[in-house]
Every structure is written in structure tokens, then in C-alpha cells.
Amino acid sequence: MASLAPTSHCKVYLAGTVASDLMDEVHQGLATLDMKPKLVGFLANDDPAAKSYADWSAKTCTENGFEFDLRVVDKKNIEEAILAANVDDAVHGIIVYYPIFPAPSTQDGYIRQVVAMEKDVEGLNHKYVFNMYQNIRFLDPPQDTLKSILPCTPLAVVKVLEFLNIYNSRLPYGNRLFGKTITVINRSEVVGRPLAALLANDGAHIFSVDLDGIQVFTRGSGIKNSRHIVQPPPESLKDLNDCLPLSDVVISGVPGERFKVNNDFIRDGATCINFSSEKNFDKVAVKEKASFYVPAIGKVTIAVLLRNLIRLIHNQRALATERTSSKPVES
């Protein structure tokens, strides 16, 4: 009798499955509004990944009761176009598809701050970024009624980990990754570094791997609820392959061959998540090691984007009510 090939015990989850509960939350939020939210996207580059993201944004908005307006502009005019949308009352949210200016230009960083905070669905405004890194979760402490906006792709990864029950719901909120070691392959200012901070702020020990080496993000000893700290790695960690055997979770998002994940070093039973436009894991080999594999998160990212948009509208209305009530009454 011929022997049977070993059966993989890896569970593969597609982004649509993970996004389902989030979209239910979006629909519930949309039902509380008396209007159709309008999201404006600005595309000022020829990047296929950016165009694909814009197309998915448009499709998802249209199918779920939102209005989407994609504005293709020359990069010379992007600042003026965003400023016009900032003051347009018909626009409730703004997303800009990066990169616009090639590295090493810092112009993209400036453009991120041109978007009005109250319309920034991506959570890239300096106030949101400051709150995220300082582990401040509300815009109005101590009342804590206006939630700060988190960047879409890092938050989408968090939602994937919650879906997979990597977060331990029996631990207090803010400590639910305590005891987990996670490798994040990408340290961009838009995705990788914010993601490492978010995960560390929830209690995880993070190896952040990029072209310039390894950094360790941690919240220090114990389970106290404080902001993360960044440290150099121990001498025993020289490269990515040293981090992989220690990691309960491997999250990769670098569109390049240099950071393809070597399956031989992945820890047995690890969770593997890819958020790059290129697949950083061997889709066959990874299933022999991983317990969970998520090959893409695009639909989760867009669900988070719409969730952020609804949150922005609630914040906009609360702030408008506050301004009205605080105006002096004319005699």
C-alpha cells in the first residue's frame, strides 16, 4: 500500500474572511448616520500597488453605501488639491496614495501633514502619530470620548491577530500580547514602525527588521500599561534568520527578494502574515511550518479605512457640538 503524503495542519485565512466582522461593524456604524459619507482619494503617481489600492477603495465604498471620489492629480498640484478638500464640507475623509515623491525626498512626509486632522482616515497626522507612539488612545483625555485614529495597514494587522486569537482576551486590555515574540519585517514610517509600536504597546516583544538591521521594541519588564521603548538587539541577533526561530508570529511586508522569508528558520507552529504586494513567504513551504498563514490583508485594510471614516465623522460631529455649546450667548 502506498504511503500517504503528510497532511499540513496549517490553516490559511484569506483577507475577506478576516474582514467580514469588521465590515459588519462598519455597516452598524453607517446605520447610525443620516448621510452618505464621502471619501476622496488622491492619486499622484504611477505605482501599480497604489492604483490597485485605489481601485479596491472605490469598489468597497460603492458596494457598502459610501461615496468615493478618486482625484488623479499631478504631483505639482497635490498640495493645493488636498487643501481644497480640507475645507470642502461635502468631503468627510481624505486618503492619499503614496509614494508621490521618490526617496530620499521628504516631501511625502510634508504632504501627510497637509491633510486636515479631522479628515485623515489614514491616521498619519502628527497628532495621531504622537498619540500612537505615546500609547494615548483618545484625543480628549480624561473624558476619553473621542478615539484617536490609527494608521490603516498597521491596524489591519492588529485586527488579523485578534481574529486569529493571538491576542489573549483573558488578559487586561492593553496587555493582551504579553509573552508573545513577534518579528516585523519592514520599518517604514507609514507601516512597519507604527506596527511595531502598536504591538509592543500591547505587551509583545518585537524584532523590527529592515535594511539597516534589527531593532527591539518592547514595553520593558512586567505587564504595566506604558509606552514602548526601542533598544538595539542583543549580540546574538545578527540578521532576520536569527529572529525567526524565536518568533511566535512573523509579519512581512517588504517588496523585494532580499527579505523573502527562509522557511527553514520559521518556528514550528508560528503564525505568518504577509502584507506586501509581493509574497514574502513561499506559499507551499510555509504551510509545513506555520499554524496560521494569511497571504494578504488588503480587504482588511480597506475595512479599517471605512471604520476610521465613520469614527472621524462621529469625532467631527462631537467637536462641532462642543464648539457650538461653548460659544458665548449674545445679549
Image (spheres, rainbow, N blue to C red):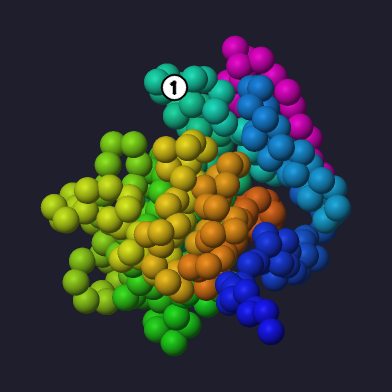
| Callout 1 amino acid | Ala
Residue 282 spot, x, y in % from top left: 55, 53
Q: Is residue 43 magenta?
A: no
Which residue carries the number 1 mark?
103
Residue positioned most to the top: 76
Q: Is residue 69 magenta?
A: yes
Q: For this rendering, which residue is in front, 59 or 209?
A: 209
Residue positioned most to the front: 1
Image position of 273 (left or right of 20):
left
Q: Is residue 13 visible in this depiction of the protein?
A: yes
**For residue 135, which quarter of the picture?**
bottom left
Residue 77 spot, x, y in % from top left: 63, 15
- Magenta span of residues: 67-88
**For residue 160, which quarter of the picture?**
bottom right
Q: Is residue 182 visible in this depiction of the protein?
A: no
Q: Quadrant of the N terminus?
A: bottom right
Q: For this rendering, which residue is in front, 299 or 330?
A: 299
Q: For this rendering, which residue is in front, 3 or 89?
A: 3
Tell me the element at label 1: loop
Residue drawn at (68%, 40%) of the image: 53
Residue drawn at (45%, 80%) of the image: 168
Q: For this rendering, which residue is in front, 235 or 91?
A: 235
Residue drawn at (70%, 32%) of the image: 51
Image position of 271 (left or right of 98):
left
Residue positioned most to the left: 235
Residue positioned most to the bottom: 170
Residue drawn at (53%, 61%) of the image: 286
Residue 81 spot, x, y in % from top left: 66, 22
> From what the image shows, is residue 173 above or below residue 230?
below
> From what the image shows, is residue 67 above or below residue 270?
above
